Image (cartoon, rainbow, N blue to C red):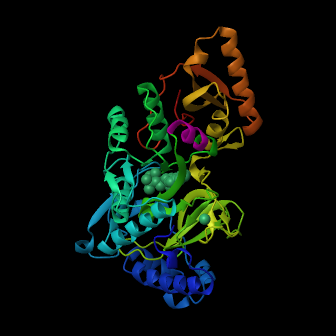
């Protein structure tokens, strides 16, 4: 199903012409920001130099650090009175970035969310529980207005009070939920304890943090939903920049609104389709906070084979952020890989925590892992067998020996928003 078929399926020359036109407008808009004005002057490049889409490579990159230096309003390209809303990033990697929106920005954003929801088959017949934080985090209000636009019955439940959330799902006949995959895991756990089967549920929209395909299978089975991946970031309005279609084989980016590139994070060289690297995004219609070649830090690749749904090129699911990557004794490890391995093991429960230390100049990774109730009551030798099994499974995939501590069900933290499962103590004096 399409919300805006013309834009969603626009391709070839027509799309390029639109992107070039919008890229030029974006550069002009960005010149209202002293940082971009100076940078573009220094690089001797202006909107007039963009004649084809490949000319984007003449433009300089913008980084998260640049945005942090502009805190709070240094990157706004319109007068304050035109800004009708403020959000901030979650601040996962340092000081949060402030993002401003004009009325047009908010309209465009909710249009994109409406496209996503319609793409996965949701309509005005659906009842939608938005179980994310409704504060400065973009996932709350962002999804809310998009879902209202589609005409869904929206329940702005926010996070927390999980038992009540489960009751609402049953009482109100909720058909679709949006939350982080971490919170979805917790919802599933509490629903199981309460003995409800969430019969009306059919669609789960999960995003804002990396989650593996094995987690998808677990969530689908526990919640009885078809689960879709939602990607976005505050700098690109918020969630909704890219989303899975019913094929669930990569996420469609909305190419009329964002120009995407993949670069080698070290050399900044532009990589071709299928090559993994850092995603760089230039939003094409933003007014309050235009950005040029924004280095997202997120690792993915472009899939340009045709999707049967008729929409444009997709990106692969995000492996993680380049700064999430742990380098343990020279080996690169993404927390999402650990999660992927753990979810294949039937004895492992829902939660784990990773600790990294430097002991006698050597990096050591230790993982606390919750074991399902039925396996924890066993004898010591059974637990040792499970522990060995986990260590082997991790070593096979990560090429790394890790220390594994088995802990009881419900002894590790649960997360309502984005999970923080890695504690890197290598900088600490122990
Ligand atoms: P912060 O960068 O402070 O966490 P945001 O709340 O804007 O602020 O989060 C955006 C980031 O969240 C993205 O850059 C990405 O790293 C992560 N993210 C969002 N959606 C997904 C997803 N579906 N898969 C993996 N990571 C995601
Ligand atoms: Zn598709």
Residue 151 position (above or below residue 34) = above
**Location of residue 245 (image quadrant):** bottom right
Residue 280 position (above or below residue 175) = below
Q: Position of residue 290 (x, y in %)?
A: 42, 73
Given residues 223 and 357, the one toward you in this image is 223
Q: Position of residue 28 (x, y in %)?
A: 42, 84
Given residues 428 and 352, the one toward you in this image is 352
**From the viewer's perspective, is 79 left or right of 181?**
left
Q: Residue at x 42, y 78 (%)?
A: 30
Q: Residue furthest top?
A: 379
In this figure, what is the number of numbered marks?
0
**Location of residue 171 (image quadrant):** top left
Residue 381 position (above or below residue 11) = above
**Location of residue 356 (image quadrant):** top right
Q: Position of residue 285 (x, y in %)?
A: 43, 77
Q: Position of residue 144 (x, y in %)?
A: 34, 57
Q: Main secondary structure of the magenta part?
A: helix
Given residues 105 and 121, the one toward you in this image is 121
**From the viewer's perspective, is 138 left or right of 425?**
left
Q: Residue at x 63, y 11 (%)?
A: 378
Task: Find the magenta span and give its range.
Answer: 216-223
Q: Residue at x 64, y 37 (%)?
A: 338
Residue 389 position (above or below residue 224) = above
Q: Residue at x 37, y 62 (%)?
A: 146
Q: Is residue 44 visible?
A: no
Look at the image and say whether residue 413 sits in the magenta stretch: no
Given residues 166 and 400, the one toward you in this image is 166
Q: Residue furthest left?
A: 81
Q: Is residue 232 visible?
A: yes
**From the viewer's perspective, is 152 left or right of 247?**
left
């Amino acid at each position: 199903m399409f919300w805006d078929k013309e834009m969603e399926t626009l391709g070839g020359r027509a799309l390029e012409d639109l992107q070039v036109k919008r890229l030029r407008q974006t550069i002009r808009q960005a010149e209202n920001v002293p940082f971009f004005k100076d940078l573009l002057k220094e690089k001797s490049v202006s909107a007039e130099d963009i004649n084809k889409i490949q000319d984007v490579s003449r433009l300089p990159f913008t980084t998260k650090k640049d945005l942090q230096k502009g805190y709070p309003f240094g990157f706004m390209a319109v007068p304050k009175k035109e800004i009708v809303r403020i959000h901030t990033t979650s601040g996962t990697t340092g000081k949060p970035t402030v993002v401003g929106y004009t009325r047009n920005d908010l309209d465009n954003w909710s249009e994109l969310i409406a496209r996503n929801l319609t793409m996965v088959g949701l309509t005005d017949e659906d009842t939608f529980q938005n179980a994310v934080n409704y504060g400065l985090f973009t996932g709350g209000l962002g999804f809310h207005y998009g879902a209202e636009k589609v005409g869904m019955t929206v329940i702005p439940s926010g996070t927390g009070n999980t038992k009540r959330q489960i009751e609402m799902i049953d009482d109100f006949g909720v058909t679709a939920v949006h939350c982080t995959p971490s919170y979805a895991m917790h919802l599933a756990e509490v629903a199981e304890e309460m003995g409800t089967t969430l019969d009306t549920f059919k669609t789960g929209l999960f995003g804002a943090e990396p989650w593996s395909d094995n987690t998808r299978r677990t969530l689908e089975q526990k919640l009885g939903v078809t689960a879709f991946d939602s990607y976005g970031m505050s700098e690109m309005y918020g969630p909704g920049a890219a989303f899975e279609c019913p094929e669930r084989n990569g996420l469609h980016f909305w190419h009329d609104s964002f120009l995407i590139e993949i670069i080698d994070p070290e050399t900044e060289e532009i990589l071709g389709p299928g090559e993994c690297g850092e995603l760089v995004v230039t939003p094409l219609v933003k007014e309050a906070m235009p950005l040029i070649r924004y280095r997202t830090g997120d690792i993915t690749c472009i899939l340009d084979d045709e999707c049967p749904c008729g929409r444009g090129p997709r990106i692969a699911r995000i492996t993680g952020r380049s700064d999430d990557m742990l380098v343990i004794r020279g080996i690169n490890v993404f927390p999402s890989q650990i999660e992927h391995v753990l979810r294949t093991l039937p004895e492992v429960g829902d939660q784990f925590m990773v600790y990294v230390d430097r002991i006698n100049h050597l990096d050591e990774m230790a993982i606390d892992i919750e074991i399902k109730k039925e396996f924890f009551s066993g004898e010591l030798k059974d637990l040792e067998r499970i522990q060995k099994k986990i260590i082997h499974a991790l070593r096979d995939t990560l090429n790394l020996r890790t220390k594994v501590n088995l802990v009881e069900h419900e002894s590790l933290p649960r997360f309502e928003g984005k999970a923080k499962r890695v504690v890197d103590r290598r900088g600490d004096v122990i």
